[in-house]
Amino acid sequence: MKSNIRVLLVDDEKDFLEMMGFWLKQQGYTVQTVLDGESAVKLVREGATDIVFLDINMPGLDGIETLRRIREFNAGIPIIMVTAFGTEERIKESQNLGISGFFPKDKDFLEAATMIETVLKTHKGLRK
C-alpha cells in the first residue's frame, strides 16, 4: 500500500517541493518536505521516512554532505539524488556514498514514481 511509504523530499526550491510533493501525494504516497539538509538528517535519524529524494545543490549543508551525514548512522535507507545540473565529480561522489539513483529535475514526475517502485522491489523491507 503506497500510503504506508513515507517519502521525504529535500530541496531549497519551494516550487519544486510543492509540485513534486503534490504529485506524489496524488499517487498515494505519504510525503514530507524540508528545505534544508539539517532537517533531513534529523527526520531520517528519527526514522520518520522510508525513501529520500535529496537535492545535490543546496545552500548551507549541501546534498552530498547531507548524504554523508545520513550514511554515518543509516547505511540502508534508499536515497535518490535530485539535480537540475550535476557535475560528474559530484555524481560520482554521490554514487560512492551508496545512492539508489538520480532524478533529474527536468524529468517527468512519472519517472520519480517509477524510481520509488524500483527501490521498493530492491529494498524488500519497504514493501508494506
Image (cartoon, rainbow, N blue to C red):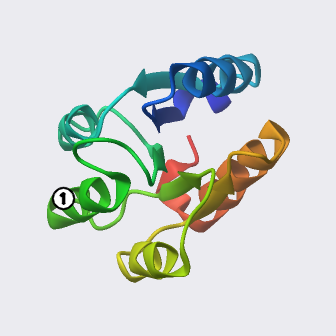
> Which quadrant, please, contains the C terminus?
top right
The spot of residue 54 in percent (x, y) is 45, 47
The spot of residue 24 in percent (x, y) is 68, 27
In the image, taking residue 21 as reference, residue 106 lies left or right, namely: right
Name the foreground residue: 126 vs 26. 26
Residue type of the residue flagged with mark 1? Arg
- Rendered residue at 56%/25% (across/down): 17
* Quarter location, residue 71: bottom left
Residue 74, placed above or below residue 48: below
Decide if residue 44 is in sight here.
yes
Residue 29, placed above or below residue 83: above
- Rendered residue at 84%/42% (across/down): 108
* Quarter location, residue 124: bottom right
> Which quadrant, please, contains the N terminus?
top right
In the image, taking residue 40 as reference, residue 23 lies left or right, namely: right
The spot of residue 32 in percent (x, y) is 45, 23
Decide if residue 1 is in sight here.
no
Tally of marks: 1
* Quarter location, residue 2: top right
The residue beneath circle 1 is 69
